[in-house]
Amino acid sequence: MKKQMKKVGALLLAGMMATSSLVGCGAAAKSGSDGAAAGGGSGDVKIGVSIWSSTDVLGSQCKKIVDKAAKAVGAEVQYVDQGHVSEQVTASVEQLCAAGCKGIIICNSADSEMTSAINTCTENGVYIAQFFRIISEENSPEVYKTACSSKYYVGAVHEDEVTNGYTLVNLLLEKGDRTIGLEAWTVGDATFQLRWQGYQQAIEEWNSAHPDDQATLTEPVYANTSSEEGAAAAMSLYNSNPGMDALIVAGGGGDPLVGSIGAYANEGLTGKIDVVSTDFLDDLAEQLKSGGMFAESGGHFCDPLFAFLLVYNAVKGNYVKDEGTFGYEILFPYLYVSSPDDYANYEKYFVKDDPYTEEEIAAMAAYSFDDLNKAASNLSIDDVISRHSN
């Protein structure tokens, strides 16, 4: 990995194409806004979406692509915003089951919530899949067993979070930053824990290789999912760490990042603190030009699209996991952006337009899992350009 990451500067806007696989407790799987409904109208499949927010930067993009998928396959979709508050996460699943959903996709905040979520779905005969998340077999073995034992837990769509974190810190280190502040969103969140592992790995390797040029990474300050708390966390880190020259905003949907860079702008620190994050902003091109942002990595909004298609096929009886297995796993590539030119292509093919047409989504809904997995793994700017130029 060290050898690969020496080329980190060349990875900008290139998807980190990690291999995708099916994982299980035994044999592999096989192919065969709160209360608001949208999408495909009167279809015979209703799918619920439990999400931290359907209105912030990333959440609204997720909602847009899921609504498009629902329309493409003639399904109905209902959203519940749960703010990554554990009690609200588990309650959202109960609410969506009670609303008559036959399937649910969920972005939970901690593995522990999935025990209740899976049990609720199992009791109600409702299929469920995670997006931006996967249950850790190592850290949450009992939750993992619960997923394996339920035929209604379909699987997960997520990214290589360790590599993501590792890459972002290496971008900062190569820039010359040595005192890096860390802003997280929720204590115990499995995705943050993996990103943090990557951040720490990069720091440890750098310090081992550069004994006379050491770098430090602060302990995380938690901002939850609001811009106000993001601003407070960013200033707390800056004021508590003399000489801090970089900030990682680990995630949180986009609002904490907006608050953080806004706070630095108000203090005249724009361009003096290199900010990196894993949430794309609506004005990222301007922020890259001004120095408000140094670099961005993105687990783009297509994760919930593929989770939707997993659950849709489970409801239809097309995807049936073997008894005792974890289910279907899709490991998504990341995108990296660190210049206005980089962002221009991302904006064209992922913001101003969707990377998939309704016709393409309808076709993917009929794919075998292996073909669906391949389509997800191949998603990149170049892939979209190639498909839409033919």
Image (cartoon, grey):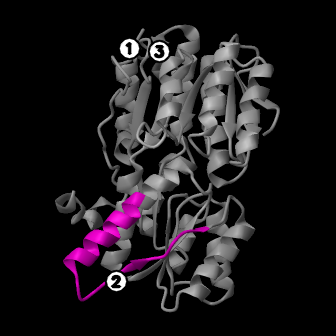
Q: Position of residue 328 (x, y in %)?
A: 43, 25
Front residue of 52/13: it is 52
User: Label 3: few (<14), some or many (≥20) within 10 Å?
Assistant: some
**Which residue matches tag 3?**
366
Rendered image quadrant of residue 5 = bottom left
Residue 343 vs 39, above or below: the answer is below
Amino acid identity at mark 3: Ala
Q: CA distance from mark 2 to mark 3?
A: 49 Å
Query: Residue at the spot x=62%, y=57% of the render?
Result: 186
Residue 70 vs 34, above or below: the answer is above
Question: Within the magenta stretch, is there residue 217?
Answer: yes
Amino acid identity at mark 2: Gly
What segment is highlighted magenta in the picture? 197-221
Amino acid identity at mark 1: Lys
Query: Left or right: where does residue 327 sit relative to residue 290?
Result: left
Residue 311 vs 212, above or below: the answer is above
Rendered image quadrant of residue 354 = top right
Mark 1 or mark 3, earlier in chain:
1
Question: Within the magenta stretch, is there residue 305?
Answer: no
Q: Position of residue 209 (x, y in %)?
A: 20, 76
Q: CA distance from mark 1 to mark 3?
A: 15 Å
